[in-house]
Amino acid sequence: MTDWLVNPLIATKVLLRSPAPGDEPALVDMATDPRVCRFLKGPVELGVAEERARRKVEAPEWGKFVVVALTSGEVAGQGSIARKRGSWEVSYKLRHAYWGLGLAGEAVTLIRTWFFENIAEEPLVVTTQRANERSRRLLARAGATFTGTFEQYGLEQERYEFYANERPD
């Protein structure tokens, strides 16, 4: 498997890189904010969030990344790319202050491009709760194909797929 983010991925609004010391406050903010975690099993307690953030920056794992807003230089979000349910899946979330600015769309496009340039497999999957309309719209704009629904955590989820030869509108 290829090395992970040897060089950061950069677009107009965001930079994606591995987690690093100093990212902990933003990671804790995301993990404890009920708005951010509304569609992600809910927020965690502060101590749990702090421990998870510490581990993420002390020993970054392959596939984990942070989203840095280029306008502020702050960590605006985080994500991962990993094998889940047999397929490669990308996941992401943004701090509430950065919602609606187009950062998540750029981050998804960057990670999608990196994936198809470095991993010779299809599809790249993204799942979201059916109730998460913003995420569903973002995935459609990014060129993902809706492929069906399933139940997880007692809630209806939607599955989207990216393919190397398909590009966003």
Image (cartoon, rainbow, N blue to C red):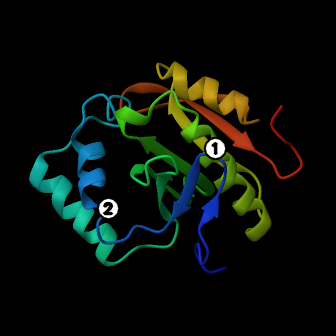
The kind of residue on which mark 2 rests is: Asp
Q: Is residue 33 left or right of residue 140?
A: left
Does residue 133 sit above or below 117 in this rendering? Answer: above
| Residue at the far right in the pictured view | 165
- The quarter of the rendered structure image containing the N terminus is bottom right
Q: How far is disc 2 from disc 1 in space, using C-alphas?
A: 20 Å
Q: Is residue 78 left or right of residue 133?
A: left
- Residue drawn where x is 26% and y is 60% of the image: 24
Helix, strand or loop for disc 1: helix
- The quarter of the rendered structure image containing the C terminus is top right
The kind of residue on which mark 1 rests is: Glu
How far from the left and from the top, in percent, is residue 82? 54, 61
How far from the left and from the top, in percent, is residue 109? 69, 47
- Residue drawn where x is 47% and y is 69% of the image: 18
Identify residue for label 2.
23
Residue 153 seen in this snapshot: yes
Q: Which mark is residue 106?
A: 1
Contact, CB < 8 Å: mark 2 with mark 1?
A: no
**Residue 66 position by quadrant:** bottom left
Frontmost residue, 127 versus 74:
74
